[in-house]
Image (cartoon, helix red, strand yellow):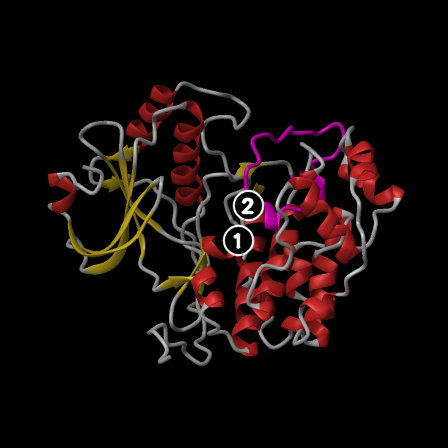
Amino acid sequence: MLDKVDARVLDRFCLAKKIGSGAYGIVWKAVDEKNGKNVALKKCFDCFRNQCDAQRTYRECKYLRELTGHENIVELEAVLLAETGSDIYLSFNYMESDLSNVIKAGLLESIHIKFIAYQLLKALKFIHSASVVHRDLKPANVLIDTSCRIKVADFGLSRSIPEDNLPGNDIILTDYISTRWYRPPEVLVGSRHYSFSVDLFSVGCIIAEMFRTQPLMQGSSSMDQLERIFELCGNPRATDIQSWRSPSALNIVDLVNAKRSVRLDELCPNLPKEAKKLVEQLLSLDPTRRGTAASGLEHEYLEAFHDPSKERVYPHGPVDIGIDDGKKLTPDAYRQALYSEFTADGIGAEQKKVTGYSKAVSYDSMDFSPRPT
């Protein structure tokens, strides 16, 4: 039975209720009896069945272990390997909801949106300073509590890359499978040399979605998604296409039929002027014109929250997850690597902690209970 929990896991965690399920696993709200904390306990099904799933599981655990201690990144509190050797249990901070559900419920006021945008960029500044690109930012991967504090989750597609990632210092990035609606044009045309700016494009989509209460561009295919991007952002110039660094970019662009021009304020009529400027910058076709997470934090739209003393960088240098991202191991090799690094009781004692935690300020607490109809 998929929802059966190992006895030794139940020795540590008291399950309260099931809060989510999908093809990859089941999530329960639980109490960690080692410390009395509420946690989200995720059982990942058969996560070593093939090389792709095993690598994703390994990356998720290793990146979260390295990036621990930031207030806007989900905390991996325990890793427990199932007795069968095929499943794995992960314990995280408990958060009441995710941004996708909150957007759909229409719970966000303007101040909430600004605070969430600030926290997203603050998390990205930390992540990118560790030479890590998330690659799968979307509302469902942004956890949120009733005080509007967010935590970025799901690092299974993350990769380590050089900060400059320029010719002569290339890392070829493959297997990009994030949700289409948040992908930048360089990824849609097949570039394998993209960098941190892919996450910034996703943030632009998310900010607009929070105001619009539905995804900004909902393409039905990669070509349709490109068409929607060009309708909103304009047809690419030669310099834009060159910046994508894809040999097939020009041929693909020639096939895109952008039928009309759409203004951002048509799609998001309630978008404040300052927010519009930030979104337009983040959605730039040329990745180099999107700026950085650090420059985004300095944007006038986020002036009310910007505080350099609280916008930390990763203090330990580029993250090394132990296995080169470009190297493909067998599923059993990834499993053995996790066995050797994570103790039977959870995360090993050598885990690094990042100092300087600053608790996020509460702004107009949100009620996640169902609204009367």
The circle drawn on residue 138 is 1
Q: Earlier in the sequence, mark 2 or mark 1?
A: 1
- Give the spatial CA distance, label 2 vs label 1: 8 Å
Q: Are marks 2 and 1 in contact (CB under 8 Å)?
A: yes
Point 71% across, 44% down: residue: 185
Q: Main secondary structure of the magenta part?
A: loop
> Of tags 2 and 1, which is closer to the observer?
2
Where is residue 48 drawn, in percent x and y?
34, 27
Q: SS at mark 2?
A: loop
The circle drawn on residue 179 is 2
Between 22 and 304, the one nearer to me in the picture: 22
Indicate the amino acid at tag 1.
Lys
Point 39% across, 43% down: residue: 65
**Seen in the image, is 265 located left or right of residue 108?**
right
**Which quadrant of the view contains residue 208?**
bottom right
Q: SS at mark 1?
A: loop
Q: Which span of residues is magenta-colored?
A: 163-187
Indicate the amino acid at tag 2.
Thr
